[in-house]
Each structure stands twice: as C-alpha cells, then as structure tokens.
Amino acid sequence: MSIEIKIRLNNNLYLRDPQETTLGQRIIKDGIILIDEIGLEQFNFKKLAKKIGSTEASIYRYFENKHILLIYLVSWYWEWISYLIDMRTMNIESAEKRLKIIIKILAHASKNDPAINYVDQDILHRLIIAEGTKAYHTKAVDSENQKGFFLNYNQLTDKIGKIILEINPHFAYPNALASNLFEMANNHCYFAQHLPRLTDVQVEGDNFGEVEKMLCYFAFTLIGKVNEAE
C-alpha cells in the first residue's frame, strides 16, 4: 500500500520537480529500473525515453543530464533513510537502541516501509549499492557541494553523529563513524555479492543480517560499548 509522502530535495537538482507530475514520477520509477538493469555507463535519456514511451526532450525538461538524475536518486535515498530513522526511533529514549535501529535500517533499507508507488525501494537500494558513490566521486564534487547537492547526506551524517555522541560524549569522530557506517553497509553488501575476498560477511538474497552484525560490532566497539555490539 502506498502512502502520500513527498521527499524534499534541493531544487537545484531538477528543472521541474518530478514528484509533481505523472511523467516525472515515471522518469524516477523507470530511471531507477533502467540504471539497475544496464548500469549508469550504458544508461542515457534516449533509452529511458523509449522505456517510458516519451521523448528525450520531455526528460530534459526535468533533469539537465544523467549525472544530475543520479544525484537526485541518491539524494532521495538519503532523505528517505533519514525519514525512516525519524519514524522508527521516535519516543525511544535509549541512544544505544536508536543506533541499533539505525544500523538495521542502513543494512536492510530495501525491506523498510513506507512503500511509495513511484519508487521501488528494493531496486533503489540495489542501485545505491552498485552506483551510489558515482554521484559524488567526481571532479565536480566541490562545486556541486557548494550548490547544496549533498546536503541530505550531510544532514543524515550529522543526525547519526549526534546519537553517537549521546552514547559517548567523548568520542572524537562521530561524523566519521556515521558516514562510515553508511558507506560500509553499501560497500560490504557489494563486496559480498561481487568481490567476496574483500569482506568477511555473506549476503544471500536479500538477507543482510551479517552486514548488520558487522556494523554493530564496529560501531559499538569503537564507541566503547562492546557489550552492546551483539
């Protein structure tokens, strides 16, 4: 069942808000599917236009190019993760419990509701694992960061970092740990599926339980709460 949620993103990421129109939602939905199917390198707006039964020009009315579309999708994902964290940690006093919930969300993002009818979270999660870092591992990252393209990621990291400091106010690297939890979750899912000698965890199907366990071990050991790692 879908629910009405609008993810708020930097309006510099689009020429027209795709969430506001049926065509825009089709661009998001089928853009995710097509990038997942053929990879970002082979993806272009001509192929996407064919898939949605429209024209390249209609897509260019929403997004300047495929790189900006990727940043949009990655930013959407960051903001959606932030929304899930807010919903699932509401009214939970224990910072340790909140961090465990966050780690579970990071590891099992594809299994979390709410479902939004123009975004398949399972496919988007797979896309983020495989393609997500290409949004900001670029020569243009500094100028794009100045435009606020990665504000959602910065805010997500800050949110998690503050919870880490609740657990241990003297921990020196809360934001570094927060961003590493996110990157580790994606990297080790990818490694387990494609480069297994680079990790010690296994992923079978959509079971990311070992990734969650590893993240808890690293997080709570570094914070100084080894007894919370299990």
Image: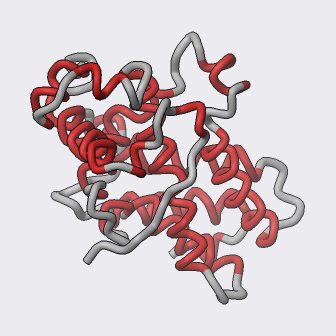
Nearer to the camera, 130 or 31: 31
* Location of the N terminus (image quadrant): bottom left
Judged left or right of residue 142, residue 68 is left
Question: What residue is at 40 percent from the left and 43 percent from the top?
Answer: 18
| Rendered image coloring scheme | secondary structure
* Residue at image location 44% in from the left, 20% down from the top: 64
Task: Please tell me in which quadrant of the rendered image residue 65 appears.
Answer: top left
Q: Nearer the viewer, residue 105 or 41?
A: 41
Q: Quadrant of residue 35?
A: top left
Q: Is residue 222 above or below residue 136?
A: below
Point out the residue furthest to the right here.
170
219 or 160: nearer the viewer: 160
Residue 156 location (% of width, % of height):
64, 53
* Residue at horizontal 73 percent and vertical 48 percent from the top: 175
Q: Is residue 128 above or below residue 219?
A: above
Residue 82 in view here:
yes
The image position of residue 41, as x and y in percent, is 26, 17
In the image, residue 96 lies at what x, y percent? 66, 77
Work out whether 103 lies above or below 179: below
Residue at point 51%, 65% (across, down): 103
How many numbered marks have been drawn onto this rendered protein structure? 0
**Percent coordinates x, y for residue 13 in the rendering:** 53, 32
Q: Residue furthest top?
A: 139
**Can the viewer see residue 192 in this picture?**
no
Along the line of sight, the residue nearer the viewer: 131 or 15: 15
